[in-house]
Amino acid sequence: MIWNEEFECMALEDLKNFQSERLARIASYVYTNCPVYKAKFDAAGVCPGDIRSIDDIVKLPFTTKDDMRDNYPFGLFSVHTKHVSAIHVSSGTTGNPTLVGYTKDDIELWSDVVARALCCAGAEPGDRIQNAYGYGFFTGGLGLHYGAMAMGLTVIPISSGQTKRQLKIMQDLQPRILSCTPSYALYIAEEARDMGLDPRQSSWQIGMFGAEPWSEAIRRDIEEELNLLATDIYGLSEIIGPGVSQECTYKDGLHVFSDVFFPEIIDPATNQPAAEGADGELVITTLTKQAIPLIRYRTRDIVGMNNARCRCGRTSPRLSKIKGRTDDMIVVKGINVFPSQIEGVLMGIDGVGHQYQIVVDRKSHGLDEVEVLVEVEESIFSDEVKVLGELQKKIKNQIDAVLSVGVKVTLVEPKTIERSMGKSKRLIDRRTL
């Protein structure tokens, strides 16, 4: 099922014309209604009349998270706050958080793109969805809620946490769809086994997992543990929340709803368009939002993009899974390190659990040290010291080979690393830089 076939299967030339019209309109809209954007456009030497085609988007200035924080709370809004129907705020730990708002039309738009995402994943009207994303300021819970209701699903708004209750609700209400972070899906499976339940016997057939990067190895583990189709949903609160892109059942890239969110891939080192087919930083322009439309927003997510038509019939470009983040990247001894590189190694080694944590510290001698805490399976941890030593050496050698940075590997017992009901914290940087 395709929710909005007119746009999701539109011929590429027609789509480009549509995007061009919308870009010209939104450029004029923010220039007229948002003083911050007027100043940014003027500083870049561009005026709305210069924007006639989607190809002209490269003339426009970038927007960053710092722009949102510096103009907190309402400086980037393009409507008066009396027209704002909802506000969401990020969970930033330092400085001003990022704040976004939605008009009634924005809420309808959000509902539509999430309905598209649900259809991509294989949902059908009348299905029940157990929504275990957090409600409140976090956009995940309400975003899935709005889209599910628009599509005609029955929403079970359980939110995150209370894992034993999650399992009881699943047993009692038999939802077909589970939505949560991938790390929490694995934790649910772990808790089910501790309760004497077989997680493979759950009612869930479809999983919509996002809000944190996750690898193909994690996907395989989730599908094996829960016996469902694990699909990736992508979004970020600055753009709209969940519903920016979503995998279809072929799991061959995340469809960007590019009549609404125009994607670019740039080289983060040069800020120029990346070469065709090359990975780079994802930049998104919201083409139709009213309350806080963003022009060329730098997501910091490193992805690839495929513009070929998908087997499902959708013509929209497809993003790869997130391969890293420019702001999650750490520099150790002059070498760029992404947590996803370490995860890729760990998930390919037998006996390693799903939980790991990377701790970076600067010791008294002034050199950076990286320690990787790795949970191992109970059967391995209870084995003889020699077996543990060999596993530890294997992990270290493989990580060192990938990163070209010497790391310390510490094997820990199952359930040692703190679990998260939302986004998991994989990286702790203790350095004072």
Image: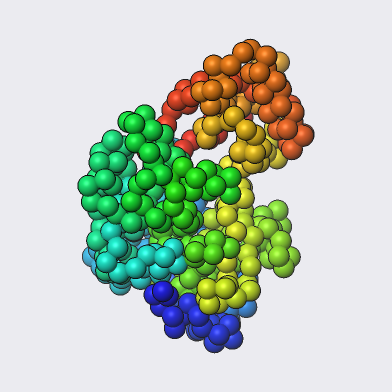
Q: Where the N terminus falls, by quadrant?
A: bottom left
| Left-right relation of 252 to 236 | right
At 44% from the left and 49% from the top, the residue drawn is 227
Q: Nearer the viewer, residue 199 or 30?
A: 199
| Left-right relation of 280 to 283 | right
| Left-right relation of 84 to 11 | left
Q: Nearer the viewer, residue 259 or 311?
A: 311
Q: How is the image coloured?
A: rainbow
Whether residue 403 appears in this view of the structure is: yes
Figure label count: 0
Occupied quadrant, residue 238? bottom left
Q: Residue 168 at what x, y percent from top left?
A: 25, 41
| In the rendered image, the vertical position of residue 288 relative to residue 351, given as above or below | below
Q: Where the C terminus falls, by quadrant?
A: top right
| In the rendered image, the vertical position of residue 272 relative to residue 308, given as above or below | above
At 63% from the left and 74% from the top, the residue drawn is 308
Q: Residue 203 at what x, y percent from top left?
A: 33, 51
Q: Nearer the viewer, residue 48 or 156?
A: 156
Q: Residue 269 at what x, y percent from top left?
A: 70, 53
| In the rendered image, the vertical position of residue 40 relative to residue 135, given as above or below | below
Q: Residue 337 at what x, y percent from top left?
A: 67, 38
Q: Nearer the viewer, residue 423 or 272?
A: 423
Occupied quadrant, residue 200? top left
At 53% from the left and 77% from the top, the residue drawn is 313
Instruction: State the residue lying farthest toward the top.
Output: 385
| Left-right relation of 126 to 120 | left
At 60% from the left and 59% from the top, the residue drawn is 320
Whether residue 106 appears in this view of the structure is: no
